[in-house]
Image: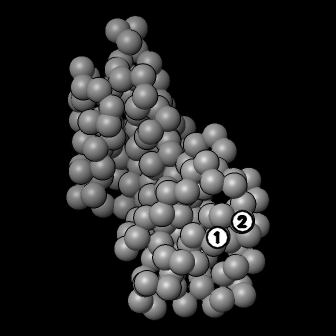
Amino acid sequence: MGNETLIKPNIVVDMTGLVCPHPLLGAKRVLDDMKTGEVLLLKSNCPGTRDDLFSWAKATGNEVVRSEKSTEGVTEYYVRKGKKAALMPHVTLDVTGMVCPGPVIEARRFFNTMVQGQIMKLVSTCSSTRDEVGTWCAATGNVLLDTLETGPGVWTFFIRKG
C-alpha cells in the first residue's frame, strides 16, 4: 500500500459535533460522487463513527486506509473510494436472534415472492447460517453474492434469486 503518511485527501468532510449516523451518511454522500482511488478525509468526534465506517467500508468495497485521533478528540479517517459497486437489495430480511434453521426457512419464504434476479439482504446472528445459506443456494440455484461479518457475530448475506 505504500507510505500511508503521505496520503493526500481529494476532499475533506468535517462532521465534528454531529452524532452517528450523520458522519457515515456524510461520507457516503461524498464518496458516491468520487472517482475510484480518490481519498476522502472524514473528521468526526462521534465515538460510534469508527465501527460504523469500517463496517460500511467493508460492505461497499471502499477502504479506510488510515485513522488517527487528534489531541482535540477528533478522529480523522482517510477513506479510499473502491471499485466494488454496492449491492442494492430489493428485500432486506433481518432475522437476528432467530435460531437455525429459521433464517434459511424465512429466506426461502421471502424468495417465493421475489422475481428471478432480485437480491435479498439477509442479516443473521445464528452461527450456522453461514454454512446453511451456502448449501441452500447451491441446492436451489440461487447465487450467494457476498457474505460479510458486519458486527460481532452478525452476518450479512447478499443472495440473488436464481
Give the x, y percent position of residue 139: 72, 87
Q: Nearer the viewer, residue 151 or 67?
A: 151
Dot 2 crowding, Cα within 10 Å, few <14, some 14–19, many 20+: few
Circles 1, 2 touching at the beta carbon (< 8 Å): yes
Give the x, y percent position of residue 84: 45, 66
**Residue at horizontal 66 percent and vertical 89 percent from the top:** 140
Quarter where residue 7 is shown = top left
**Residue at horizontal 63 percent and vertical 72 percent from the top:** 105
Residue 63 visible in image: no
Furthest-top residue in this view = 71
Q: In the rendered structure, find residue 101 and report the number of the disc placed on it.
A: 2
Left or right side of 91 for 96: right
User: For the residues marked 1 and 2, what is the alpha-carbon distance in whole angstroms?
Assistant: 6 Å
**Residue at horizontal 45 percent and vertical 91 percent from the top:** 116
Describe the element under mark 1 as helix, strand or loop: helix
Dot 1 crowding, Cα within 10 Å, few <14, some 14–19, many 20+: many
Q: Give the amino acid type for the residue marked by disc 2 in the picture.
A: Pro
In this rendering, the answer to whether 18 lies above or below 122 is above
Left or right side of 134 for 150: left
The residue where tag 1 is placed is 104
Quarter where residue 72 is shown = top left
**Residue at horizontal 23 percent and vertical 58 percent from the top:** 33
Describe the element under mark 2 as helix, strand or loop: loop
Q: Quadrant of the C terminus?
A: bottom right
Q: Give the amino acid type for the residue marked by disc 1 in the picture.
A: Val
